[in-house]
Amino acid sequence: MRFHKVRWLFAALVLVTLAAPAAAQQLATPPAPLWRVEANGDAVQTDLGFIMPARIGAFERKGFTSTRSDGRSTMTWYEDPNGLSLRILIHLRVDVRGFPMEGRVGDPLDLNWSFLQNIGSNAPEGQRIVHQRIGWNGGPHTNAIMQLDRFPGPQGAEFQGMWYRNIGVWAVLAVASGPEARRTEIEVAGRAAMALPWPGAPRGAELIARARGFLAELQDCGTIDRSGNGSPVEINSAVGAAMAFFLAPNFIENPAETYLHPASTPGDYCRIETFTAAPHEIVALAWRGDRSGDRAARYAFMVRDGSSFVQFETNLPARAASPQLEPLGISRAVQLTFYNQRNVAVTQVFTDWPSYEDAKQAATRVLLDGQIPVILGRRTPQMIQVSVNHGRVIDPPAGTTPSAAAKGN
């Protein structure tokens, strides 16, 4: 009970700060490193790319504030000419920050909702009209919560709509309110907020939130196959383009296929060992999923808090069936893929599965020192961007066979 009292005291303090009247807030963005103002008046969050425009339809931005100096908790106020209110809260997820919250264990949507509904709502006790899971912006995947409430006000019945979802390590809550007679306009305002060009995050962002539970349930592998003969190789543009094709679905919330990742299929991994490579403790994993298809993984390594994860994986069939690989003399293009809360990248390519020791050395270098990627993927508010680094991709010289392009780094 003591914790819950402290938690609700914290929520009340945030509520007092964020729910103050718009007139008392500053119109520009707060002096926080994560935010800047564009020439057109848009407030842009530089970490993942959230955009709080100067106007949303008939609503004009009237205030912008943050409870944190780094801008990791912000509220933006909008009003239409007739006094309807629209507020958008962007908050670093409470499960990412390690706060144990009420809600269904393993359900990040429910856990964060239990916190944000209390600091984002202006409604006193009233009548609950709707509480349901929906697809943000009308999509088929139920990745959001909508709640509609009616409550008494000084001038008559008031109406409030709340729309909430997680985007990577961030939680987003839109709250529209006003007289019940204008319910239709209030719901339209909420849908307009949902339809803003929101950014996206790779599945690596979800691992940060789930890392603690994932590691708690992780089983030791026992004996594993540590052999391998794959060596580093430079790739040509055809192989690079094929690999780039498979990075984009990392940003799709409900892809047709389940991707090989602890955030998607945690039961497919076991622990090989845990070792320290200053300043990080790194957990070495073996993938033990179905290897009968073309897509497979073997070894993976993650910083304990889940903030960085690398995996040796392949999305291309073996050479006998692959027109991209056969001319290069590569048995199987195994990529070392890097994931964090913003990006997914292919940092190195191997001719086949490397041994465990070779994999461990290559992965540790990437986790500790970073590496210029061969292929980089990121989702901005406008699009998914996947680019091939032509500085690390080679093409066969004129008049030579394609196999001459394959050479060790």
Image (cartoon, helix red, strand yellow):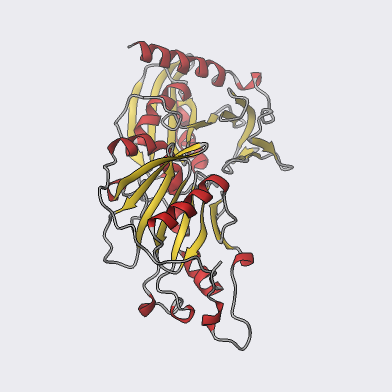
**Which residue is the extreme one toward the bottom?**
399
User: Which percent across, then down, holds residue 331?
Assistant: 40, 74
Relative depth, front residue between 44 and 149: 44
Number of marks present in the image shown = 0
Relative depth, front residue between 73 and 79: 73
Screen quadrant of the C terminus? bottom right
- Look at 51% across and 45% down and name the residue there: 195
- Look at 57% across and 47% down and name the residue there: 369
Q: Which picture quadrant has residue 385?
A: bottom right
Relative depth, front residue between 55 and 100: 100
Relative depth, front residue between 175 and 70: 70
Left or right: 356, with 192 as reference point: left
User: Which percent across, then down, holds residue 192?
Assistant: 51, 42
- Look at 57% across and 29% down and name the residue there: 74
User: Which percent across, then down, holds residue 240?
Assistant: 52, 68
Left or right: 161, with 35 as reference point: left
Screen quadrant of the N terminus? top left
Q: Looking at the picture, does residue 397 appear above or below residue 271?
A: below
Left or right: 364, with 142 as reference point: right
User: Which percent across, then down, holds residue 90?
Assistant: 53, 33
**Which residue is the extreme one toward the right?**
39
- Look at 59% across and 69% down and name the residue there: 393
